[in-house]
Amino acid sequence: MVGTTNGAAIDFAEFRQAWRVLLLAIAGVMISINAALLYGFGVLVIPLQTQFGWDRPALQAAISFLFGGAVIGLQLVGWLNLRYGIKRVTVVSLLTMALGYLATTQIGGSVWTLYAAFFLLPIVGMGALAVTWTQLLAL
């Protein structure tokens, strides 16, 4: 026990045992598909607009498809983590997420290809969604 808060002792034993899991969870949330695409999308709007001629409202609608795919991915990943294990599901998801990002570089023509990519990425990368890292911390 170290330190006190409002007269109660603070016990850091659990933190000392699992600080690596906490760091892994933080890194996982940072690379999760929702965080990466949501917070990184703003810098892509003008290049996408210039390259493909899509207007900004049409581009911003991609975020709705991102969260639509996340709703499905979040429902599936909890069940898959319990059935097959967090490690296996996460590794497969990270590989498929990388392939999904690679496939996204081939979009073009219709803005619907962007919508499809944003919808599918959180599904193929579901093991890297925040629910996995939350489940890991809870364990």
Image (cartoon, rainbow, N blue to C red):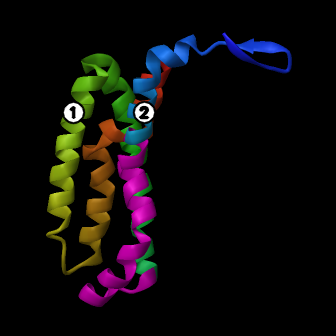
Q: Is residue 115 above or below residue 132?
A: below
Q: Are marks 1 and 2 in contact (CB under 8 Å)?
A: no
In screen coordinates, is 17 left or right of 83?
A: right
**Residue 15 percent across, percent down from the top left:** 53, 19
**Residue 97 percent across, percent down from the top left:** 23, 48
Q: Return the residue nearer the eye: 105 or 6.
A: 6
Residue flagged by tag 2: what amino acid is it? Leu
Q: Quadrant of residue 105?
A: bottom left
Instruction: Decide whether residue 78 is among the magenta residues.
Output: no
In screen coordinates, is 53 left or right of 133?
A: left
x 85%, y 20%: residue = 6
**Residue 23 percent across, percent down from the top left:** 42, 33
Q: Quadrant of residue 115?
A: bottom left
In screen coordinates, is 16 left or right of 49?
A: right
Residue holding disc 1 = 91
x 42%, y 42%: residue = 29
Cα gap from disc 1 to disc 2, whole angstroms: 17 Å
Residue flagged by tag 1: what amino acid is it? Val
SS of the residue under disc 2: helix
Circle 1 packing at 10 Å, graded few (<14), some (14-19), many (20+), is some
x 28%, y 69%: residue = 114
Residue holding disc 2 = 23
Which segment is the magenta one? 28-56
